[in-house]
Structure formats: structure tokens, C-alpha cells
Amino acid sequence: MRVSVIGGGAIGLLVSYFINKNGGEPVVYTRSYEQAEELRKFGLTYKNVDGSVTTVMVDAKPFAQYSGEESWCVIAVKQTAMNELMGLKEYRNVSYLFLQNGISHLSFLNSLPQKQIGIGVVEHGAIKTGLTTVHHLGEGRIKLSSYRGDNEQRWCELLHSSHFPISLETKWEPMVYEKLIMNASINPLTALLRITNGELLTNIHALSMMRELFDETIAVLNMTEQREVLWKELLVLCRNTSLNRSSMLKSVESGKQTEIESITGEIIKRGLQLKIKTPYSRFAYEAIRALDWRG
């Protein structure tokens, strides 16, 4: 079965590889013609956590050629590219699965006419090297839930494997907000300090700042009762993806716009509405925006 994957970044390539390993036929839609041509010509190369390398052949096209031909589609672009996806509204019969950080995309999902929309959060560590290679730096899971409809079980069948587990969640809100807590605590610090996820645990000053961001975020999201459990999950995530360089760090390093608005920006907005002070989040937001402006 052909499954389209919109996004040729680390997560898009990672998802495409496991769709292939599960017997599916991924069609990768990339921003550039060059990447699509390279993928068709040389295949998608997957480097495992243990260093082993596998190459699989995939179909690939530039996103400009996307026409809703495949009835199942994974959206693996960053929040900063969501405004380029307005054309998805035309393809009412496609089942979409959205894999984004932050929560800014929720209003976009609500505007879509499709009856089948899934939403997921990715806990894997991965980095794209070159145009066709993805390095799986840390095995985690994808938490997946239905935003609208009932196709989440089928998505699980398409994606799940022993090295790519899928966890089905009954409600999408807690899943998305827990991921937002992780992103808001990890990503800005790794981008500002230019460190890996694991270094947040070994550097006592970074760990202290991460705790402050974490406390502000759970307060704004009214999740302080789960503080102990969520803090443990955050530490486990940093360990499991210890070698990973966050997407925000990679954006800063490459001079691209970050997703700070949809992550920390949302925390600040909610804090203002609830009259909860968020000084650490405000500093992180302004500092990353300064780097965005420079880029």
C-alpha cells in the first residue's frame, strides 16, 4: 500500500523507512526537487542506533506535485511550514496523521474537512545527514491518538515495529500537552547552549534551568499534580535521546526559523491569560527569537 509522507526531514525519513520495513510503499514529498531526485536514485539510507546501515528504495516527489493520490498521508513538517499545507483541504478522502511539536497546528487541524485525522507525538531521536540518510540516535515511541475519526489502529499497523513502537492513546489532549512540556523544557535550552539532550542532565546549571522551564510549563497547563511523574518522564527522555540534537538546535545552527512560537510562545500566551508569571520561558523565547531574527 502506498503511503505519502510530506516532509523530507529526519522524522519524515525515519517514518518512511519503517513504513517500508512494514511492507508499505512510502512516497516521500520533499521541499526540493533535488532531494526527491536523490531519494529516487540512491534510496533512503537508515543508520541504526548500533551503527548498522540499511538502504531501501522509495518513491519521492517534490511537494509541488502532491495531489492527494495516496489515501493515507503522514504530515512530518515543522510548525513553521504549516502555512504551506492549506491545499490539503481539497483532499477530503485522505486520512492524515500529523506529527508536529508544539500546539499551534491544532487550529489548522480544526479547519480541515477530512473525517479521518490522527495526531501523534514523536519521542525518537533522529538526525538527517545529507539528503537521503537518517541516523536513528535514540529509540523512543510515537504516541498516537485520533483527533477525528477512528483510523488510529490502522496507523499503528502501518508504522509499528520492535524498533519503532506505537502507543495508542484514548485522548489526544494529555498526549499533546505532555509532549509540549518536554519540548518547552528541552528545546530552547539545547538551542541556546548548543548542547545535546543528554548534556542537560550532566551539566548542573543546564539541569537547573530545565527544571525552571518545566515548572513554569506545568503550572500554565494546570498539570502540577502530575509533577513527579512528568519530571521522571522528562529525565528518561533526555537519557533515551542523549545523543540527539533537538530540532530547535538544528534550526539555529542552519540559520532556519525555529518553532519557538508554537512551543514557548504558547506557554507565555497561556501564562498571560491565567496571570501566571513565566520569567524563564520569556527569556528563552526572546533569546531564541533574537537568533531567529539574526538568521
Image (cartoon, rainbow, N blue to C red):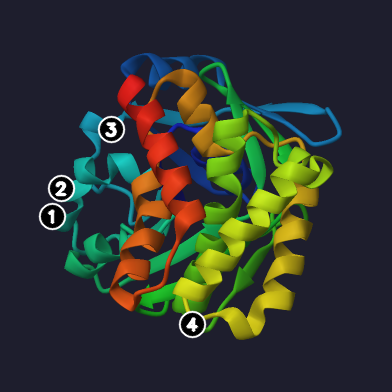
**Which amino acid type is shown beneath numbered disc 1?**
Glu
What mark, if any, has residue 63 been given in the picture? 3
**Which amino acid type is shown beneath numbered disc 2?**
Gly
Question: Disc 3 and disc 1: Cα gap in Å?
Answer: 15 Å
Q: Residues within 10 Å of mark 4 (few under 14, many from 20)?
A: few
Query: Which residue lies under the disc numbered 2?
Result: 87
**Which amino acid type is shown beneath numbered disc 3?**
Phe
**Which amino acid type is shown beneath numbered disc 4?**
Lys
What mark, if any, has residue 90 been given in the picture? 1
What kind of element bears circle 1? helix
> Along the polypeptide, which appears first: circle 2 or circle 3?
3
What kind of element bears circle 2? helix
**Vertical arrangement, residue 23 with respect to residue 13, above or below:** below
Spot occupied by residue 282 in the image (x, y as percentages of width and height): 42, 51
Query: Which residue lies under the disc numbered 4?
Result: 171
Question: Disc 4 and disc 3: Cα gap in Å?
Answer: 31 Å
> Along the polypeptide, which appears first: circle 1 or circle 4?
1
What kind of element bears circle 4? loop
Spot occupied by residue 153 in the image (x, y as percentages of width and height): 53, 74
